[in-house]
Image (tube, grey):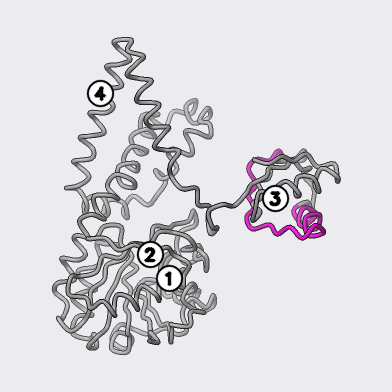
Amino acid sequence: MLWNIYIIGLGLIGGSLGLALKDSPMAGRIAGTDTDTSTVKKALEMGAIDEYMGIAQGIPEADAVFLCTPLGSYPKIVETIAPLLKTGAVVSDVGSTKEGVMNLFQSLPQNVWKIGGHPMAGAEIKGINGADRYLFENAVYILTPHQETPPHILESFTALLETTGARMKILSSTRHDEIVASISHLPHLAAVAMVNLTGGDDEHLMMAAGGFRDTTRIASSNPELWEDILFSNREHLVKRLDELILSLDKMKAALLDGDKETMFYCLGQAKEIRDRIPRVHRGLMPGISELVCIVPDKPGIIGQLGAILSKDNINIVDIEILRVREGDGGTIRLGVPSADDAHRAVAALQRHSIKAWVR
């Protein structure tokens, strides 16, 4: 099946979805709209959509409609598109919670298929300027189909989204919301609480090291967007908050009582569970091997690294500047396809007097 696609909302996720589906053999025309005309213009320039269409024009021609706007805007959009959808169209979304969305989708005509969606991917740069063809590569993409969705429709729609590079998983909307309450929404509230504990004090902020910054990074997210998300999942989230409070109370009591055994158990259990989380790097398959090198701060140094490794036919599949001191040097992380490549890369760099080691 060749899908004509219509995207409502061309920000980070909507724009990335358009780019990722652009070259899919299952995608036909990709059209879209956004309330911001400059966003539409940018999406067209980037090739995230083939053409701009207003809702009245785009919905009747679409085989798949994606809602890529904040959750609070869904009711109005669903009301608008309901009478315009063609028979057999799929309506999906990219929202962070699913029970409320699937309940809302119930108001859509019976002759269209409702498949909730949640690509668990993001980026530091928000809006269309952060859109990335490979944003979904290896990201988990959850689908929560309505129970009446025919198997062949779900199979074809899943195959379409698999062409983005995402790893698809089917869940009920309830199970989805239970899980994200634990792994996404609760950590966000914890990060907010920890940042607010500093009171914005300059000395706290100056001394905030990598651990604090990494742990609280998500607290910099859009407050309006997250207010929508948190309240849409508050039933499951409140339960998890109660459990977190009990866990913190347990560790607090251990500290007060000098109970090192309980504290050690809590720390050890957390390490054991945390270490089982699959290591999947941005846009890369599991199993990537890493090396770290120290380089001087001078023009062309990144290109020099690539030139050195290319002579040994070693492909750099990921690169990250970890730290830099202007005028002196910096530490760079390189990702290569295999452990053998990593060791060969280290040897090649060391031959050029560049300090390097396998991570």
Work out whether residue 7 or residue 112 is closer to the camera in this orientation and state it: 112
Q: Which residue is mark 1?
A: 162
Q: Which residue is mark 3?
A: 340
- Amino acid type shown at disc 3: Asp
- Amino acid type shown at disc 1: Glu
Mark 3 or mark 4: name the one nearer the start of the chain. Answer: 4
- Image location (x, y in percent) of residue 118: 33, 62
User: Which quadrant, please, contains the C terminus?
Assistant: top right
The dot on residue 249 is 4
Horizontal relation, residue 346 to residue 179: left or right? right
- Image location (x, y in percent) of residue 172: 22, 60
- Image location (x, y in percent) of residue 222: 37, 52
Q: Is residue 320 magenta?
A: yes
Q: CA gap, disc 1 to disc 2?
A: 7 Å
Mark 1 or mark 2: name the one nearer the start of the chain. Answer: 1
Q: Which residue is mark 2?
A: 168
Q: Secondary structure at mark 2?
A: strand
State whether residue 92 is above or below residue 180: below
Q: Secondary structure at mark 3?
A: helix
Horizontal relation, residue 93 to residue 295: left or right? left
Say which of marks 2 and 3 sits in front.
Answer: 3
